[in-house]
Image (spheres, rainbow, N blue to C red):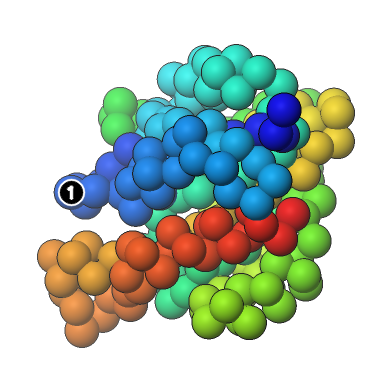
Amino acid sequence: MPRRILVTGFEPFGGDAVNPSELIARDLDGRRVGGYRVVGRTLPVDAHALPKALAAALGDAEEPDAILGTGLAAGRTALALERTAVNLLDFEQPDNAGTLLSGAPVRENGAAAYFTNLPLARILATWHQAGIPGYVSDSAGTYICNQLFYEVLALNERSIPIGFVHLPCTPELAIARGPAKTPSLPLELQRRGIETLIEAL
Ligand code: PCA
């Protein structure tokens, strides 16, 4: 039986028509990538609903052998491999349920932060060899993506590989937001970046 990797994306938020992370997670669902069978799921941009939706996705993936979260971070210039998740929810904009959290913990009495256990240097080298621009980011922010990343790292009792990638806008999103100030990469290249990362695990 191939190993299973849970790949999560997020629904659109903040006025964007689509979220590339959702499109990629959907596209990869059920596919074989590297040594893994992908279980691709979309999560809500909703701080209160997220833990339950994550539990359901983890159930679908039946104790996955790896987890890769993905989300959109408009303004990023390339694929951003996140190193750190922090125990902080401090939103600049409400989530899709209208919740605006300030200075709240992801988990009461949780560790201040967690690091990913992915092989960052190897993934970067593999990306660059494959012509995919990517870099290591030291902050996944303090919004819903950081919440997910923190939750999956906090739950990691079996020490499986867990990572998170922030994606830039697609060209379509950049055009809608104002192309003079919004960097973008084609969805196809972003998808190949996610596949290449899974192959490098
Ligand atoms: N990006 C947001 C939440 C959902 C998403 O795709 C974030 O960076 O927190």
Residue 59 seen = yes
Q: Is the residue marked 1 within 8 Å of ligand 1, measured from its CB?
A: no
Asked whether, in this view, residue 57 is left or right of residue 197, the answer is left
Q: Which residue is mark 1?
A: 17
Q: Is residue 178 above or below residue 38?
A: below
**Residue 120's image quarter?**
bottom right
Residue 144 can be seen, yes or no: no
Q: Position of residue 77 (x, y in %)?
A: 43, 77
43 to 194, vertically: above or below: above
Residue lying at 79% horizontally and 31% vertically, measured from the top left:
156
195 displayed left or right of 62: left
**Outermost residue, front direction?**
1
- Residue 157, located in which quarter of the rendered image? top right
Is 62 on the left-hand or right-hand side of 27? right
Q: Quadrant of the N terminus?
A: top right
- Camera-side residue of 196 and 21: 196
Give the percent coordinates (x, y) of residue 21: 40, 49
- Quarter of image, res 130: bottom right
Quarter of the picture containing the C terminus is bottom right
Q: Nearer the viewer, residue 171 or 73?
A: 171
Residue 106 shown left or right of residue 16 in the figure: right
Front in this rendered view, residue 33 or 85: 33
Q: Identify residue type, mark 1.
A: Ala
- State the SS at label 1: loop
* Up-down relation of residue 177 to residue 113 (above or below): below
The residue at 33%/63% (across/down) is 187
User: Image point 65% across, 41% down: which residue?
Assistant: 36
- Residue 78 picture location, percent across and down: 47, 74
Q: Residues within 10 Å of mark 1 (few under 14, many from 20)?
A: few
Could you tell me which residue is drawn at 52 percent across and 76 percent down? Answer: 132
Q: Position of residue 75 (x, y in %)?
A: 38, 70
| Image: 58 above or below 14 | above
